[in-house]
Image (cartoon, coloured by chain):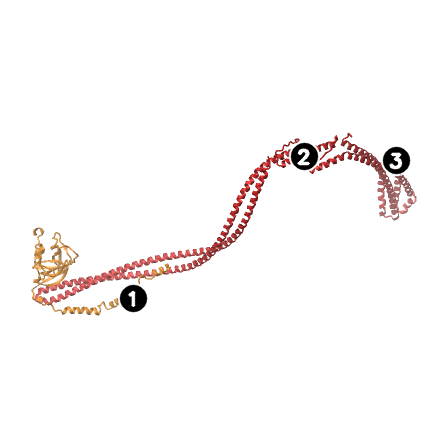
Amino acid sequence: MRWTVGKKIGSGFALGVAILILVGAVSYISTLKFIGSAHWVTHSYQVLETSQALLSNLENAETGQRGYLITGEGRYLGPYNGAATAVSSDIAALRRLAADDPVQRQRLEALQPLIAAKFAELRETIELRRKKGLPAALPIVLSNQGKENMDAIRKIVGSMEGRERSLLNQRDTEEKARARRTELVIAYGMPLGLILLALVGFMTSRNITRPLRFLSLAAERISQGDLKMDLPSDRRSDEVGVLARAFSVMARSLESLARAAERIAAGDMSVELMPRSAQDVLGNAFVLMRDRLRQTAAEIQESVNVLGSSASQILASTTQVASGAAETATAVAQTTTTVEEVKQTAQLSTQKAQYVSETAQRSAQVAQTGKLSVAEAIERMNRIREQMEAIAESTVRLSEQSQAIGEIIATVSDLADQSNLLAVNAAIEAAKAGEQGKGFAVVAQEVRTLAEQSKQATARVRSILGDIQKATTAAVMATEQGSKAVEAGVKQSAQAGESVQKLAESIAEASQAATQILASARQQLVGMDQVALAMENIKQASSQNVASTSQAETAAQNLHALGQKLRELVAQYRV
Amino acid sequence: MEKREIQDKAKPSRSFDWGAIRRRRESIERAAEQGWAPSAEAATKVFRERARALAQEPARAEALEETLKAVAFLLAQETYAVESRYVREVYPLKELTPLPGAPPFLLGIASVHGQILPVVDLKRLFELPEKGLADLNKLVILREGSAELGILADQMLGMRAIPVREIEPSLPTLVGIRAEFLRGVTQGPIVVLDARKILERILTFQGPNKDT
């Protein structure tokens, strides 16, 4: 067999197609003829139908005429009027249909005058009936001319129908014979063609399908990864042989690639690979894969080193974090205790603030009282000053009076002096008088003694007056000082009043501040409660944190171990 | 503590006895009502002392002795005496007119009963030291015949009867002008002046240059 598979399949198909064309041609021709005869059958039926309609319309016209003749009423002329136009259109249709048939055309020509005559007779009778009445029209009807025309028309129409019917029969016979022939062609042609095609298909499959099935099985095994196979090494020169050889080459190539992959899998990246051509996708991909793997392995080695050291650092950090978390937990526990203490302190502060606030309010009242007291004190002081001024006035008056006394006393003293001198002079005179003057001398002596005593009395009065003067001066000065002291006292009291006022203001501010402090302290207390609660939560979180960090520490140890293992694994790769 | 201080200050620093003041004032008022008359006790005491003084017997012995009647006065805390027959009168010195160009002891001139008299300061005459304050407002007018002058005195002490035998001659230590004007000194001590000599010397005073 020197034929290629294409030629084999092509020749088989050509034989089948020839048989199909033969059967199809026969069927087509008979169908065309059948369609033509069907047209003519239709044509004949149309002629028959139209001629029947013509007759019917004529009869309608006659019926209308007769109704009118009998009744004389216009409404009976309806069928007649419709029939006139229908008849003319029927004749036109028959003329169209009979265009290809000379015999029929001849008969139609003969029919036309008869129809015209019939209509003329009808029209005449109707006119007469209308104009002259029934008796005038009746003789025309009774003349029987209309009936004769009608019979002639019926006869011609009957002959036309007879011709069409004979044509129909003839065509029916021809159709039956042709259908029989076509039937025979199809009945014998189709099985013959089928048998020939089956024969060709069997032969082709025998020649092509078996090797292909073998190859498809091999391909299936290759697709499942089985490269160990024995392919038939027959020297077929057609496509199947080529396919088999190509399969064998592909299998060997795949096998070599698989071996290379095995070596790569074993970690040997130094395997030599050559792509079989520029389009060797798999080979190129293998080379690329080897290069990439080599590069990746190098990078992985590097990364694993980094990973190992990072894991070590993470382990160290995690250990530190774990110990830090433990310390934090301890600190948090201490802080919680402290917060509790601070809370108690805040409670105490609140109580104190309340106490202070109440005290400040009481102080404000006391300050108000103090203010009033100071005002009263100032008033009293002023009264004292007035008294002092009155005292000073009285004392000065006293002093002035004592001055008057002094003047009087000076006069008295002078008088005493003069009395003394007079007494001395009297004594002198008495002495001069001698014995007669002795008594007078005694009197003079007595007078002198009295003058002396008066003098001494005035001296005493003067000294007392001096004392009084000193005393009054001292009193005036004392009252002046007292007045000044009172004034100072008033000023001092005013200052004290201002101080008390300021004190009252300060106390009011302090009271306000104390109230604010109280509010703040209460808020603080609430805040401390919240802080205590938050600290409790933090404490719990911290203990959870400790647990988590110990877990993290374990995980870091595992990670570290994993890093070590990875380092050992990566060391197996030869780059 | 401050409160206690304030209360302490509010109390009077020392208790003042207004009751005593009132009592004293009332007694003064009573005295004023009675016209400042001394109390009955005081009056009785004064009268009793006077009676006792008057009841004493005057010393009779003195009368038998020869006495010198003299006017005694005080000058610069010393007692001087002038024989009364040379004393015209004693007189208060009202005003003194200084004389320009006069010797220092001659203080000036004064008018007594319309009569112009020279006024002598014995302290300057006797060249005594000027010590202490002196009244010098009394004038003892001396007279011998028509010669008259006034000597200044602090205070008049009145008449004295000085026993002559008690007058001792002036001290030998006294020389010069003092010895010249003194008659003697008693036990008092009273310096007895020689009025006649004073009048002579002063009224015949020619000035210091002619005197020596």
- Protein chain holding label 3: A
Q: Disc 2 marks which residue? A: A255
Q: Is residue A82 above or below residue A343?
A: above
Marks 1 and 3 in Cβ contact (< 8 Å): no
Few, some or many C-alpha atoms within 10 Å of disc 3 (few <14, some 14-19, many ≥20)? few
- For the N terminus of chain B, the image quarter is bottom left
Q: Position of residue A73 (x, y in %)?
A: 86, 48
* Residue closer to the observer: A443 or B157: B157
Q: Amino acid at mark 3?
A: Pro
Asked whether residue B202 is in view, the answer is no
Mark linked to residue B19:
1
| Image quadrant where residue A176 sits | top right
**Chain letter of the red region:** A
Q: Disc 3 marks which residue? A: A102
* Residue closer to the observer: B69 or A568: A568
Q: Position of residue B24 (x, y in %)?
A: 27, 66
- Protein chain holding label 1: B
| Residues rendered magenta in the picture | A101-105
